[in-house]
Amino acid sequence: MKRSALLLTIAVALISVAFLVFREKPSSGYELKIFLTADVRGRLVPCGCFTGQFGGLTRVSTVLGEPDSKSLRLDAGDALEGPDDFHRMELAYIHRAFAQMGYAAANLGHREARLSAPELRQLAQSSGVPLLSANLLDSQTGAPVAKSHTIVKRGGWRIAIVGVLDEMIPAVELGTGLRVEKMSTAIGQLLPALKKDADFLVLLAFTNQEQLARLAREFPEFTAVLGGKVTQPSQEAGREGKTALLYVTNESKALGTLRLRLDSPGDAALLGGDVMLVHHQIAEDREIEKLAIAYREEIRTTTLALDDPTRTAADAVPGVRSAPAFAGSESCTTCHAAAADVWKKSSHSHAFQTLVSRKADADPNCIGCHTVGFQKPGGYRREFGISKLTDVGCESCHGPASRHVERVKAGDLEGGRLRKLGAADCVKCHHGEFSRPFEWEAFWPLIMH
Ligand code: HEC
Ligand code: HEC
Ligand code: HEC
Ligand code: HEC
């Protein structure tokens, strides 16, 4: 009994070693699939403002499927939505999503470069995915704030992934303590060592089409150059010399795929590549959605910079008449019963409940269009909860009307007139991914009063 157990252990050990040895041997003709995202811009989940909406990492994750050791999943930069504290908190969850989705690296884009050097170092430390930038440097030490590159193994081949962002970033938009080195300089310095350590080189460059092609010409050592800072995703994989080119953008609505055959070190064939739209029929991955929910719960219990009332306090210049404040929809109903009836029947009157049911009612990414006057003097504040100025109220469209109420009550119809509205007043909320295409003729009759 003992003997057979021992034999079994030895057999298992031998098989494992053989397996490892076999696995480690680069396999010529290995087909590598690279998946590419860029410009995620905070889209962990689509906001859900209308059915038919595209995008969201929840859907990208469904397309990618379970993490595997065969594909290479990369992000070319601009995963961050904006520079505010809640955007930074959200970015940490996006990196958790990348890690959960088996990403091999995330490159820094211009949006990330607005963060300060210490913030980026902290993100690089806490992220479960290697954060790349060979040319975003600490202005004091000259050292990269993230990793210049990472090396992964696929099919036994060592693949080095280098990250850069283009140097055309205005100084005012660069985070404190940061400096950007020229992409070519940083890459040139890295290459000699990398060529020894890796069989294939892949470049993630947050830059435009022309620069992507230029880098491919300048450094033909790269098997693939991926971006970027573009206005339109590429239709299909391109080629510059022997280097494959692919780029995506569009707030997580585009997913690039590149198929390469790895033959011998530095020698790969481009089998094909395309960019697919992350359309609304793709199911959302519940595991990634859980991260969005966790973000929304964390944001609910965190005091944010925008919660500070002095940030939006009405400008009280002595001698100047103070700006009108928000009176609240309830204060309009007595005099405008007919308008109020129409409004109550429209979905505008329960737009905040929509957020509550999605647990998004404390998320500044959502509150703006589902409340009255968020971020304006006297407007909705997160501490109000559901107590006041919720929903798309009368003043979400008509503007702060406290003076109107005051003047009319004083018998002065002219003193507090509200201006005439038009389509432009609707489009400030009904635009882009937040609405079906807006047409006055189709939308106004549904809420006309
Ligand atoms: C720029 C303004 C804007 C922002 C920001 C916004 N919404 Fe909306 N939302 C709208 C508009 C406009 C509609 C109605 C769209 C339509 O009818 O086509 C809507 C509708 C919705 C609906 C659909 C309601 C229904 O029952 O049909 C949901 C759900 C929703 N929003 C959730 C969110 C969440 C969650 C966020 C934050 C991630 C968010 N919204 C951010 C403007 C916005
Ligand atoms: C402050 C942001 C905001 C403004 C301004 C705004 N809307 Fe909306 N609208 C929304 C939101 C949010 C919803 C979805 C509410 C929900 O279901 O939660 C919506 C929904 C709608 C709907 C679907 C209503 C229904 O009952 O089916 C129509 C129609 C509409 N809006 C028309 C307009 C028109 C016309 C204007 C301009 C006169 C306008 N909206 C201005 C935010 C806005
Ligand atoms: C005390 C009664 C009263 C209250 C309260 C009141 N209104 Fe009015 N409102 C009027 C009267 C009266 C007019 C019509 C003036 C005229 O005939 O020219 C008017 C006109 C308007 C108009 C048309 C444009 C204009 O200024 O003439 C809008 C829009 C309006 N009110 C919005 C509101 C909103 C929004 C609220 C709540 C914040 C509100 N009103 C509260 C009495 C009131
Ligand atoms: C979604 C945007 C929106 C909301 C919400 C809204 N209105 Fe209006 N309202 C309009 C538009 C657009 C007009 C027509 C253009 C104009 O008169 O400025 C209008 C017109 C009016 C008028 C003038 C009507 C006339 O015949 O002269 C009054 C009064 C008014 N609204 C009151 C209200 C009251 C009270 C509420 C809340 C119960 C409200 N509105 C909510 C967009 C809105």
Image (cartoon, rainbow, N blue to C red):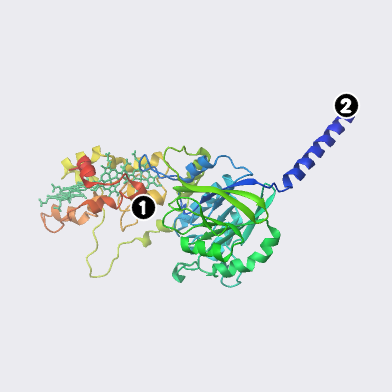
Q: Is residue 34 above or below residue 230?
A: above
Decide if residue 49 is on the left or right side of residue 220.
left
Question: Residue furthest toward the top?
Answer: 1
Question: Horizontal and vertical percent for residue 50?
Answer: 35, 41
Which residue is labeled 1 in the image? 381
Q: Amino acid at mark 2?
A: Met
Question: Horizontal and vertical percent for residue 121?
Answer: 58, 61
Question: Looking at the image, can residue 351 be seen?
Answer: yes
Q: Of helix, strand and loop, which one carries label 2?
A: loop
Decide if residue 139 is on the left or right side of residue 279.
right
Q: Work out whether residue 447 or residue 22 is closer to the camera in this orientation and state it.
A: 22
**Quadrant in the picture for the C terminus:** top left
**Quadrant in the picture for the N terminus:** top right
Label of residue 1 in the image: 2
Within 10 Å of the Cα at label 1, are there few (<14), some (14-19), or many (20+) other Cα atoms? Answer: many
**Quarter of the render that holds ligand 1:** top left
Is ligand 1 within 8 Å of the beta carbon of the residue shown at mark 2? no
Q: Residue at x 45, y 55 (%)?
A: 81
Q: Is residue 121 above or below residue 37?
A: below
Is ligand 2 within 8 Å of the beta carbon of the residue shown at mark 1? no
Q: Amino acid at mark 1?
A: Arg
Q: CA distance from mark 1 to mark 2?
A: 73 Å
Q: Residue at x 53, y 40 (%)?
A: 287
Q: Work out whether residue 423 or residue 357 is closer to the camera in this orientation and state it.
A: 423
Question: Horizontal and vertical percent for residue 88?
Answer: 49, 56
Where residue 265 sits, quadrant-wise, is bottom right
Within 10 Å of the Cα at label 2, are there few (<14), some (14-19), or many (20+) other Cα atoms? Answer: few
Which tag, 1 or 2, sits closer to the chain's start? 2
